[in-house]
Image (tube, rainbow, N blue to C red):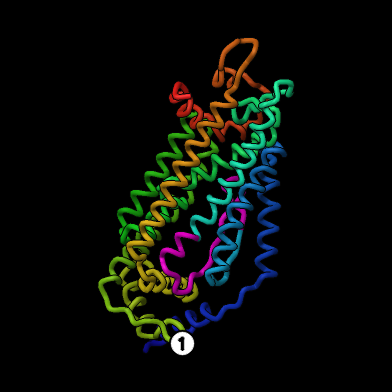
Amino acid sequence: MSGSGVSLVAAVRAKESQPNDWRRQTLVLLVSLALFVAVGLLWWDLRLVLMLVGILLLHEGGHFVAMRAFGYRNIRMVFVPMLGAAVSGQPIRIPRWKKAIVYFAGPLPGIAISMVLLLIASAGNSDANASVSAVPILLMNSSHPWLLELGGLGLLLNWMNLLPLLPLDGGRIVQSTFARPSPWREVFGRVLTMLVIAGLGISIGEPLLLLLIFPLLFTMPLTYRTCWLSRRLSEDEIPTPTASGVPEAAIDTIASAIDETALRALAPPQKASLVLQLYESLIAPPPTPLASRMVGLVYLGSVMVSTLFGWWIWSLHRWHDPAVGEFDRLDTYSNQASFDKGSQIILPACTELLASTSLVF
């Protein structure tokens, strides 16, 4: 084995035995959270920032708990100013159906809790003497405006995360359960996601949304090459794990494939992470037909239930302007000069879609 091969094996072993540094990871979380709040306050008001922090903590916390339950290593959560938050971890021989549960663990608790909040907010409107206030950000009325706003925002963001677009949770669920690795499918999914984001940003006149495109764009070459390597290596016979971790023969095979691409220039620590990622994707057992059906039913059911529930809540609280005497959601919304600019990101495009189906209710 060459010197570079020995150093790569050593780097892989170091990654495999790396302990969880909870103190450092907690510090990173707190610092990134402080930056998220500080930068967010430059664009949004405090109410919206706190709501977003709560929704993101619940969503990413679900991923975090599921990863810990399934034995992921080096789990860390980080907030990204103006973009959201993320949880990462190193799976260790995790079946794909368990990975699907990890992806579900983010949006489903958020959807469930948001539905409860919306039901509580709706119950208050049943009182004929209740004081009903406007909720501009959601284009609705309610006797509990802050509760309706928090629940509606949580439902919307988690519902959007279930869309079958990469790299959203919904896209990952579909990919890990039903699809073989395909570099072009990965690229197509990300391009489609970028087009959706760009279309939404242009349609509502919100350039801030375009910031979400840059991470997808910058990581696309690495994503394509990684997926290509996974597809290429799936044709080879990869040794099964040993008590010491990834067999050296597997490391050599994967490293040889990496050296055929531009990724050969990666430093040993980064290449070791890529080796572990590829090895995990190659040895992860595919879901059984029963597991695939169960994942599919949960996915379709959660999307349908959250969509229908959102329509029902929206129809129940549609913005009503007594001075106009009719539902006047979009015009009333656009004339509110007191709205913070960040609130314009959240719902107008979805409201357009809902408005087109309002006759159903």
In the displayed structure, does residue 355 sit left or right of residue 138?
A: left
In the displayed structure, does residue 19 sit left or right of residue 162?
A: right
Which residue is under mark 1? 243
Where residue 79 sits, quadrant-wise, is: bottom right
Kindly tell me whether residue 266 is visible in this rendering: no
Residue at x-position 52% and y-position 43%: 211
Residue 84 part of the magenta segment: yes
In the image as oriented, which residue stretches furthest toward the left?
A: 235
Question: Residue 181 or 96: which is nearer the viewer?
Answer: 96
Question: Residue 116 or 15: which is nearer the viewer?
Answer: 116
Q: As shown in the figure, which amino acid type bears the numbered disc 1?
A: Ala
Give above or below for 328 relative to 46: above
Element type where label 1 sits in the image: loop
- Residue 269, horizontal then vertical, whole percent: 49, 74
- Residue 11, horizontal then vertical, whole percent: 49, 80
Residue at x-position 44% and y-position 56%: 219
Residue at x-position 66% and y-position 48%: 54
Residue at x-position 48% and y-position 60%: 101
Residue 20 part of the magenta segment: no
**What are the residue bounds of the magenta stretch?**
78-101
Label 1 packing within 10 angstroms: few (<14), some (14-19), many (20+): few
Question: Residue 206 or 162: which is nearer the viewer?
Answer: 162
Give above or below for 144 relative to 64: above
Where residue 94 sits, quadrant-wise, is: bottom left
Kindly tell me whether residue 102 is visible in this rendering: yes
Where residue 317 sits, quadrant-wise, is: top right
- Residue 278, horizontal then vertical, whole percent: 39, 70
**Which quadrant of the rendered structure holds the N terminus?**
bottom left
